[in-house]
Every structure is written in structure tokens, then in C-alpha cells.
């Protein structure tokens, strides 16, 4: 056994009083690399061993404050900058409503972070290769004995003197602890490249897996059933109805709100005589007219009413809206054409509301006037 | 009878030796479970299976198989959630708040109560996830950069819940694990088989009972207790915000947070007391989980039960004193409306029966306290039912009033939740030490140096 490397000499005591005394004496003798192992924390030992107060509290403070800052900044960024949205009439930075999450993140960061720092940096755990493991000494201090172990690395270490000191203190059992092969070569490396690489791979797998699950998998069958469900589209066939059309005509003999039947279906002259534009040429009405004109009229008539169709001859080009005839028409006649259609132009009575039709008339007037502007219009 | 008040009552009766305590607590882990254990497990697994079948049917057909519908959009799912989160409050209260108050009697029950907290929060956490109807989409509850470029709504109480419950679970778990670490080391050192030794070595992280470690260990315990104390109070506060922040009469009250927290501690202690009555008997731990401990728990139940009773009274008083006719109607409706029976179950179980704990004879009678504990949990379940369902069934528009009747699936899932909780609890008693070995050793009469007083 003696060719093995000595780790420490250990002694076992029976009572907390004895270990307390032993710790005091060993500290006063000037030993530094020693440790006391007890099955539970014995009060007063820290003072006897002259240990400095634990600094974990500072780590908890810093981690807690960072947690609070991270939570608040993230909520500020996501709710006020990245995707600002007013919810429940609250301001973008609704501090009172952010308090609960800030508190929770503070507690989470501080508790979990401090524990991890304690385990990995203060204790240098996990370490199952420590020389003290698997010894009779460890089995006894785990149960009901109180042990002290002075390491061979201690500058004052002298095997004979240490043993003498232990027996003077009344130790029950004195034992030498040797390294075994694994333990000599063992180094607890938190920053070992393989360990870091392992953490990195785990992080990638977790992040990638989460991303795949939430952003890809949920859009595949069968999870996408809400997007792919059976429904009736406009213009589609539908066997549900006897006529096979998906769209339904209005119920016989009813009039939809805002769609009074047009009175002058066959009488354009009468319409020209009797109808006049109820709208004033305000900016708002002209904007509405422009929007509706661009949507419904411009594909054939062109954006400026010149008859320059965008349909590449799939539909015959209509005549220009700037002809003498149309400029001479009263507003009611243009309105009539929108309602009833003309030649191959269909009726737009169902697509547009009353207001929109008259707004289009206003806009056509504006286009006409723009192309044949008079001297005074420039003022 | 004269009592010497100058001497503290021993936390652990009879000053057993360290190794006797160690042996007593660790032995059940070495023995094969007996028939009674398998019988109990069979019952809880059947309950769990019932719940699983009902849940499977729910996932297949949608939440339409439940009894809830407009206007009662929250029913058993949320009732169960609040109930189980409440059960989970006793453990951290015992391990954190009583630790800060230097209540040494907590050591015998802390480990078990913390375990119950973790299992109760796990059970509770299922319900909001199920309640969403499509639980595979629950990932959207987390703020992560998704393809919609959309973040969660940090101003919503429902989102606060996500953070509160998950933080509570994580911190409770860490607290539990830190407490378990020395015990894992202990089990490692007494393990007879190789496989056990490997498992315990991994979980002990190589703990060496070193005082240089204990020195920081005691500090982290204090820090964790310090954080867990406001945390445990915040969790049910935030759960109560789910209701209090809305504008429904009957929910929109400022008394909700303290009232919910008191109720949570109340029901949690009742559950812990009920289970411990069995544990101390089965594991011969009557001298560790003493009658004195149980009596103190009953006193806490008496206190919190009275606080809950005060809240019931104050709610009615404010409904009348506040002069809001709609609010007043809601409260009268609770007591005398369609669900009056559940209201009176709640009042009698939560307010009246626990008052029996004023008598020392009842407080120290195992059978009596067990029955009262069960009644308290029945009452607390109905409290959540009353708050949620009666309020929703009578909203502002009389034309949309409704009546909620649970379906067989609602009941099945409720039974399943009990099955899950007790299954986990049973497995826990056979895999981990149900009482903290290191902590109990530290509070034995002869555990601390004699010349060292005042700590």
C-alpha cells in the first residue's frame, strides 16, 4: 500500500463536542488544507474553523438584479419596440402589469443561478472521484461519526505529528487515505472542451427540436387541421345545395340593406335628368372614389380613364372617358352606366355601395378636369 | 398538569441515536414493496387510467365533451387547476417560511411536504394545458421567436400564471433537490448493490458531508428560503389575479390575493396532514412526525380556515356596503341561487368544521383530525367551484345566463388528477427518503455541541 500516494490522514470522533474541539485545535495549530466531515451541519464549526462568511448572498443579489433587468428590458423591447400593440388601453410600457413577470424571473434567476454557482464553482461538484469516496471513513461520517481529514498537501503536514495530534484529541479511529489510479488523474474541468461541446450540442438539439416542433411540426398533418378544414369557398361547387353552387343568391323578394333596387333600369335619359350627385367633392370622397375606381374600373378603363386596358386584349378596350360625349353627360348618366352596365360592361350595382358609386363619379369628373384643365384651375 | 415552558419540546421524541434514525428512514428503500403497496398503487393507477382515457377522448373529440359552454367557459378544468396549485402551497410554506421562523418541528415533515408540492404543481400544471383545448399548441405560451414574429402578452394575468407556476415548480424542485443531496450521499454510502450505488452517486453529485460545503449549504438554504417565501405568496396571488383583474362581479375584488393564499395554505396543510397520518404509521415514524407536529399543523389550519371564513364574510359585507346592486346580486345568488348547495358545502367544510380545532382533544385525535382534513379539502374544492362557476353562470346579460352540469369526462379527469398525484406520491415513498435524514439528525436532542447555545 505504501507505494500509493497519500491523500490525507483522517480521524473519527463520536460526538459533536469532540469534533468541535478538534476543529478548534487543528485550526489553531495552523493547518490549512483540512476538512471536517459531519453527517449534518454542526453549529459553531464555522467559527472554530475560522471560515469566512459565505459570499453566496452577493451572487444571489447580482443574479436577482440581472433577472429583474432582463425581464423588464425584454418586456419593454417586445411590447414597445418589436411588436408594439395596445392591449386593454395600457401604455406600451405598462410597468404595473410587468411587475409579476419581473418578480418571477428575478426569483428564478437568483435561486437557480446561485445554486448552480454553489454546486459547480464553490463545491466543484459533480465529483465522484474524490479520494474520500468509497472509504470506510466516508461511510461512517455519512452515518453517525464526525470526521476530520488533514491533507498531505498541507505545508505543515507530517504524518507522525498528525497522528499524534489526533490521538491526543481522543480520536476513535485513525486512518490513512490513499489516491487510487483514477483519482490521481482526475481533474474537475468545468471548461473542458468536450464538456463545453456537449453542452453546446445539447443546447442546439433542444433549441432545434423546439423550433421544429413549434414552427414546422405543428404546420404538418394532422396538426394543421384547423388550416386545412373543409369549407365552402366563393365560386366553388358545393353538393350541399340542390343547385350545386357554393354561393347563395339573396332570398327571393328581399332587399339587402343599402342596396335599394335601381329605378331607371331601362331609362338612361330619365336617370340623367332626375339623379344628381349627393356627395361634395371633398378630399375624403375623392380618395374613396379613387380607391374604388382603381379597384373596379381601372383594369379596363385605365388608371386615368384613357381606355388603356391592362387586360392585354383579353377583353375589348373601352372608349376613353375623356370623350366629348361623356364630358357632356350629367352625373346621373355615369351613375346609370355603373349601375346597369353598357355594351359589354357588366353592372356594378352589387359590388359597390351608393356612396362608392357616387364617389367614383366624382373621381371621373376630377380625371376629366385634370386632362382638360382650364386656366383658372391652376390658381 | 404543569408544563415547563423554559424547556423546548424535543422535535424528535426519545433521542434516538443517529444511526437508528438513519436506519429507520433509509430502510424502506432497501426493502421490496409489500402487498399493501401494490394494492394502493393498483387503486391510484386505475384512477390515473380513468383520467387518461377521459383525456384521450377529450383530445380526440375536443373540449366539447366537457360540460362547460357559454357562459360558463371555465369550469372543472380551472377549478382543478386552482385546487391543485393550492395543495402545492403547504410544502414550500413548511420548508421556507417555517424555516425562516426557526420552527424546528418542520424538519420531520418538510421533505414529504415539499414532495407533495412538486407533485401537486405537476398535476395542477396539466389543467391549463388541457384547458387550451389543443395542448400541442401550448408552446405559444412561452415567449420565443416564432414564425408569426409575435410575442406573448406580458400584461395578461394568464401569462403571469405561466411564469408564476413554472417558476414555482422550478424553485421548489431546486429547493427539494438541494435538501436531498446529502441524503443521496448517505444512501450512496450505505448502498449494498452496485446499481443503487451508481444511481445514488450520480444524484449526490459526489457530496462529501464536508463542513466547508455545509458552510455554504446553510447559506444557500437560507437564500432559497428567502426567495421561496415571497414566491409562495406570489403564486396564488397571481392565480387570484386571473379572476380579480377581470371586471366580472364576484371576481373583481381586492380581497382575492390574501384570501386565495390563505385558502391555499389551508387546503395544502389539510392534504399534508392527511397523508402524513398514514406515513407516520406505515413507516413507524411516530416519534419523528410527532403528535406535537400534527397538532401544530392543525393550529395553522385553524388560523388559515378562520382567515378564509373572514374573507367569506368580508366579501358579503363589501358587496352590500359597496352599494353595487349587480355585485350584491352575485353574492346573494351564490348563497341562495342555483348553486346554493355548493356554497353551503364550502362554508360548512371550511368555516365550521375546522373550528373544532379549538379543542385540544380534537386537535390531538388522529381520527377526528383526519376527517376534518378531508372535509377541508372537499370544502376548498367547492370554494373554487363556487367562485368560478356561480360567477360565470350569471353574467351581466340575463338572456345569456346558463347552468353548468359536469359530464362524466369532467369527473373522470378530476379522478385522474387524484390518481396522478397519489401515484407519484406512492412511488416517491419507495424511491426517496420520505424524511430528511440529515436535517432530522441535526435536530436530535444530542446533535449540537453542548457548550454552544443560542443558535
Image: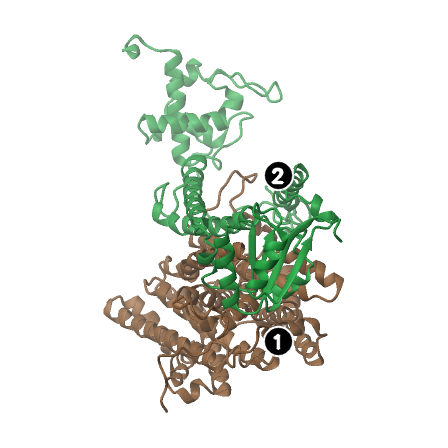
Chain colours: A green, B brown
Q: What is the x, y in percent for residue A238?
A: 65, 47
Which image quadrant: the C terminus of chain B?
bottom left
Classify residue B364 as left or right of residue B199.
left
Classify residue A225 as left or right of residue A318.
right
Local crowd at mark 2 within 10 Å, few (<14), some, or many (≥20)?
Answer: few
| Of the pair B267 and A248, the residue shown nearer to us | B267
Q: What is the x, y in percent for residue B57?
A: 65, 64
Check the residue under mark 2 and report the chain it is in: A
Q: Are marks 2 and 1 on the same chain?
A: no
| Of the pair A7 and A229, the residue shown nearer to us | A7
> Which label is found at residue B383?
none
Disc 2 and disc 1 in contact, CB within 8 angstroms: no
Of helix, strand and loop, which one carries label 1? Answer: helix
| Of the pair A8 and B5, the residue shown nearer to us | A8
Q: What is the x, y in percent for residue B156?
A: 42, 51
**Residue that appears at 36% across and 65% down:** B258
Classify residue A327 as left or right of residue A1.
left
**Residue that appears at 67% across and 56% down:** A176
Q: CA distance from mark 2 to mark 1?
A: 41 Å
Q: What is the x, y in percent for residue B263?
A: 41, 70
Residue B433 vertical placement versus A328 (above, below): below
Local crowd at mark 1 within 10 Å, few (<14), some, or many (≥20)?
Answer: some
Residue A14 vertical placement versus A2 (above, below): below
**Residue that appears at 45% across and 26% down:** A293
Rendered image quadrant of residue B242: bottom left
> Which label is found at residue B24?
1
Mark 2 highlights which residue?
Answer: A191
Of helix, strand and loop, which one carries label 2? Answer: loop
Which image quadrant: the N terminus of chain B?
bottom left
Amino acid at each position: 500500500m505504501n507505494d500509493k500516494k497519500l491523500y490525507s490522514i483522517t480521524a473519527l470522533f463520536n460526538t459533536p463536542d469532540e469534533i468541535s474541539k478538534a476543529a478548534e485545535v487543528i485550526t489553531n495549530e495552523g493547518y490549512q488544507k483540512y476538512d471536517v466531515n459531519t453527517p449534518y451541519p454542526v453549529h459553531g464549526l464555522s467559527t472554530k474553523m475560522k471560515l469566512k462568511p459565505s459570499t453566496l448572498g452577493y451572487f444571489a443579489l447580482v443574479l436577482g438584479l440581472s433577472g429583474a433587468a432582463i425581464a423588464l428590458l425584454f418586456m419593454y423591447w417586445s411590447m414597445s419596440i418589436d411588436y408594439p400593440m395596445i392591449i386593454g388601453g395600457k401604455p406600451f410600457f405598462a410597468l404595473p402589469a410587468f411587475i409579476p413577470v419581473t418578480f418571477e424571473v428575478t426569483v428564478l434567476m437568483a435561486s437557480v443561478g446561485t445554486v448552480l454557482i454553489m454546486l459547480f464553482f464553490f463545491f466543484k461538484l459533480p465529483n465522484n472521484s474524490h479520494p474520500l469516496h468509497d472509504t470506510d471513513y466516508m461511510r461512517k461520517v455519512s452515518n453517525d461519526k464526525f470526521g476530520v481529514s488533514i491533507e498531505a498537501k498541507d505545508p505543515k503536514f507530517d504524518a507522525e505529528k498528525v497522528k499524534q495530534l489526533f490521538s491526543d484529541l481522543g480520536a476513535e479511529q485513525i486512518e490513512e487515505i490513499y489516491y487510487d489510479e483514477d483519482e490521481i488523474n482526475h481533474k474537475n474541468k468545468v471548461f473542458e472542451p468536450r464538456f463545453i461541446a456537449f453542452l453546446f450540442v445539447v443546447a442546439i438539439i433542444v433549441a432545434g427540436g423546439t423550433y421544429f416542433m413549434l414552427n414546422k411540426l405543428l404546420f404538418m398533418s394532422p396538426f394543421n387541421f384547423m388550416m386545412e378544414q373543409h369549407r365552402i369557398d366563393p365560386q366553388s361547387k358545393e353538393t350541399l345545395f340542390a343547385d350545386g353552387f357554393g354561393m347563395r343568391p339573396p332570398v327571393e323578394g328581399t332587399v339587402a340593406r343599402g342596396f335599394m333596387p335601381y329605378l331607371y333600369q331601362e331609362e338612361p335619359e330619365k336617370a340623367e335628368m332626375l339623379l344628381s350627385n349627393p356627395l361634395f367633392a371633398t378630399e375624403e370622397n375623392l380618395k374613396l372614389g379613387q380607391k374604388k375606381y382603381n379597384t373596379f374600373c381601372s383594369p379596363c378603363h385605365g388608371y386615368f380613364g384613357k381606355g388603356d386596358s391592362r387586360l392585354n386584349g383579353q377583353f375589348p378596350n373601352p372608349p376613353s372617358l375623356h370623350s366629348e360625349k361623356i364630358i357632356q353627360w350629367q352625373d346621373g348618366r355615369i351613375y346609370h352606366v355603373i349601375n346597369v352596365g353598357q355594351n359589354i360592361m357588366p353592372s356594378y350595382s352589387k359590388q359597390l355601395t351608393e356612396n362608392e358609386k357616387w364617389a367614383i363619379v366624382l373621381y371621373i369628373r376630377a380625371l376629366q378636369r385634370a386632362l382638360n384643365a382650364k386656366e383658372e384651375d391652376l390658381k | 398538569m404543569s408544563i415547563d415552558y423554559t424547556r423546548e419540546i424535543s422535535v424528535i421524541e426519545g433521542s434516538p441515536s443517529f444511526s437508528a434514525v438513519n436506519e429507520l428512514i433509509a430502510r424502506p428503500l432497501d426493502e421490496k414493496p409489500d402487498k399493501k403497496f401494490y394494492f394502493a398503487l393498483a387503486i391510484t393507477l386505475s384512477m390515473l387510467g380513468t383520467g387518461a382515457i377521459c383525456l384521450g377522448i377529450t383530445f380526440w373529440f375536443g373540449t366539447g365533451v366537457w360540460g362547460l359552454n357559454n357562459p360558463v367557459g371555465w369550469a372543472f378544468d380551472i377549478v382543478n387547476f386552482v385546487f391543485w396549485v393550492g395543495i402545492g402551497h403547504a410544502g414550500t410554506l413548511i420548508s421556507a417560511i417555517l424555516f425562516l421562523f426557526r420552527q424546528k418541528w418542520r424538519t420531520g415533515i418538510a421533505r414529504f411536504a415539499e414532495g407533495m408540492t412538486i407533485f401537486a404543481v405537476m398535476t395542477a400544471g396539466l389543467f391549463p394545458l388541457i384547458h387550451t383545448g389543443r395542448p400541442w399548441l401550448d408552446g405559444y405560451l412561452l415567449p420565443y421567436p416564432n414564425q408569426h414574429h409575435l410575442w406573448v402578452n406580458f400584461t395578461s394575468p394568464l401569462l403571469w400564471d405561466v411564469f408564476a407556476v413554472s417558476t414555482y415548480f422550478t424553485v421548489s424542485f431546486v429547493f427539494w433537490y438541494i435538501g436531498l443531496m446529502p441524503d443521496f450521499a448517505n444512501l450512496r454510502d450505505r448502498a449494498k448493490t452496485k446499481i443503487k450505488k451508481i444511481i445514488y452517486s450520480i444524484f449526490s453529485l459526489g457530496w462529501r458531508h464536508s463542513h466547508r460545503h455545509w458552510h455554504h449549504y446553510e447559506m444557500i438554504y437560507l437564500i432559497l428560503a428567502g426567495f421561496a417565501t415571497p414566491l409562495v405568496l406570489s403564486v396564488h396571488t397571481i392565480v387570484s389575479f386571473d379572476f380579480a383583474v377581470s371586471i366580472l362581479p364576484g371576481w373583481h375584488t381586492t380581497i382575492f390575493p390574501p384570501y386565495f393564499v390563505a385558502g391555499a395554505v389551508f387546503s395544502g396543510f389539510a392534504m399534508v396532514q392527511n397523508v402524513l397520518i398514514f406515513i407516520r404509521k406505515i413507516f413507524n415514524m411516530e416519534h419523528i412526525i410527532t403528535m406535537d407536529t400534527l397538532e401544530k399543523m392543525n393550529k395553522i389550519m385553524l388560523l388559515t380556515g378562520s382567515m378564509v371564513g373572514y374573507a367569506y364574510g368580508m366579501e358579503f359585507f363589501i358587496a352590500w356596503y359597496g352599494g353595487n346592486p349587480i355585485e350584491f346580486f352575485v353574492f346573494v345568488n351564490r348563497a341562495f341561487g342555483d348553486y346554493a348547495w355548493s356554497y353551503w358545502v364550502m362554508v360548512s367544510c371550511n368555516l365550521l368544521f375546522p373550528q373544532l380545532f379549538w379543542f385540544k382533544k380534537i386537535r390531538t385525535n388522529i381520527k377526528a383530525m383526519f376527517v376534518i382534513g378531508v372535509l377541508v379539502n372537499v370544502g376548498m374544492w367547492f370554494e373554487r367551484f363556487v367562485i368560478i362557476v356561480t360567477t360565470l353562470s350569471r353574467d351581466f346579460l340575463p338572456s345569456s345566463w346558463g347552468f353548468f352540469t359536469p359530464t362524466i369526462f369532467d369527473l373522470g379527469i378530476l379522478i385522474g388528477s387524484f390518481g396522478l398525484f397519489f401515484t407519484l406520491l406512492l412511488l416517491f415513498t419507495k424511491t426517496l427518503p420520505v424524511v430528511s435524514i440529515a436535517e432530522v439528525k441535526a435536530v436530535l436532542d444530542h446533535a449540537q455541541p453542548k457548550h454552544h447555545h443560542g443558535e
